[in-house]
Image (cartoon, rainbow, N blue to C red):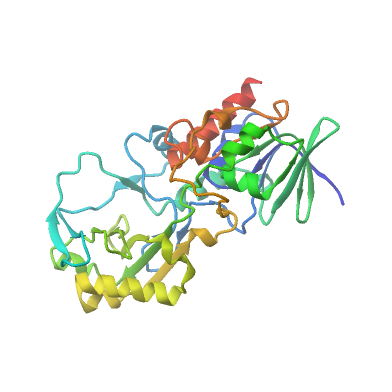
Amino acid sequence: MKIIESDIIIIGGGLTGLTLAYLLRSEGKKVLILEARKRLGGRIFTKYQNGFAPQEMGATWLGKQHTALINLLKELNLGVFEQKLGDRAIYEPISTSPPQLVSLPPNNDPSFRIKGGTSMLIQALQKQLSPDYILLDQIVKSIHEEGGDMMVKTETQDFKSSIIISTLPPFLLRSTIRISPSLPDSFISIASQTHTWMGESIKVSLTYKSPFWRAKELSGTIFSNVGPIPEMYDHSDFEDSTFALKGFLNGAYFSITKVERLELIMVQLEKYFGAEARCFLAYEETVWRKEIFTFSDYANPVLPHQNNGNPIFQLPYLNGKFYVAGAETANYSPGYMEGAVRSAQFVFGQIVGN
């Protein structure tokens, strides 16, 4: 088997990997992204269907404090728009009382969405890269040092490089890829106890012909302590021409079927909105726990965001030939899109500075 050679190999074609390749493109280095999925984007995943609102199954929102992400969007000529919250929301505090209609305070710190869907960012970064920068369907099995070079073995191909950067969630890296020589015990210990952002989430979205909830002087904003949906929002597109509701389903429902999850959602929404809730055009969901290239079961309980941003992830390993990047590794806004971009910028600085 012929070995494919590159100066830098990036494992993972999500936001961090693509941003890093984008930053490296003018450095005169041969860069190669190895992505296990058949698509780019990782935990950025927008589902598109003609005539329907883009349905966000992954990362969605950003805030004014996310300056690295905002600057990247400006560079790529991508716009943002404010998430609709409205003046009133449905709030369900306990199961023994009916849902309440509550007034929302003025939103002085709004969340924003990317015009056209979050995957527009992935598409824009991909357009900045030569097609030979990216290989899909490459499931990395092992990394080892050989004669001063770093070797990567996937299920179908062998690669050689001077520098390797993993952008996988640290726990997934630890549990799915064999590395030789071994990384320090201190790294392995922390990685084994690092939470994978969105790993337990279930994202759900329903598209509709019209925003019927607005006719009822509602906003589409829902907060419930009863569930199974704890949060839901108006997810109509920027032009407000296609309409949707999007939210989270309690992660405990990962083990039942899609049909069963949908019926649970319908029962809850019908309680709030009446029979119109069942007149949806499309239902989409992503159960991130079942995404094997994102999530792997923890050996011991891990708290949300546990060890995200730990300083151990900012260190180079294997004599400066192996770096760890990704949303969970950033020292600012770890676990979010902002953290993913900042992580790419940080590792870029480390590599270029060497």
Rendering coords of residue 206 (x, y %): 35, 68
Please tell me which residue lies in front, 225 or 301. Answer: 301
Rendering coords of residue 24 (x, y %): 61, 33
The image quadrant of residue 31 is top right
Quarter placement of the C terminus: top right
- Residue located 63% across and 45% down the image: 173
Specify whether residue 25 is in view: no
Please tell me which residue lies in front, 45 or 311. Answer: 311
Rendering coords of residue 41 (x, y %): 53, 51
- Residue located 34% across and 45% down the image: 80
In the visual, does 83 lie left or right of 36?
left
- Residue located 36% across and 47% down the image: 61
Please tell me which residue lies in front, 86 or 310. Answer: 310
The image quadrant of residue 64 is top left
The image quadrant of residue 220 is bottom left
Note whether 97 is above or below 125 in the view shown: below
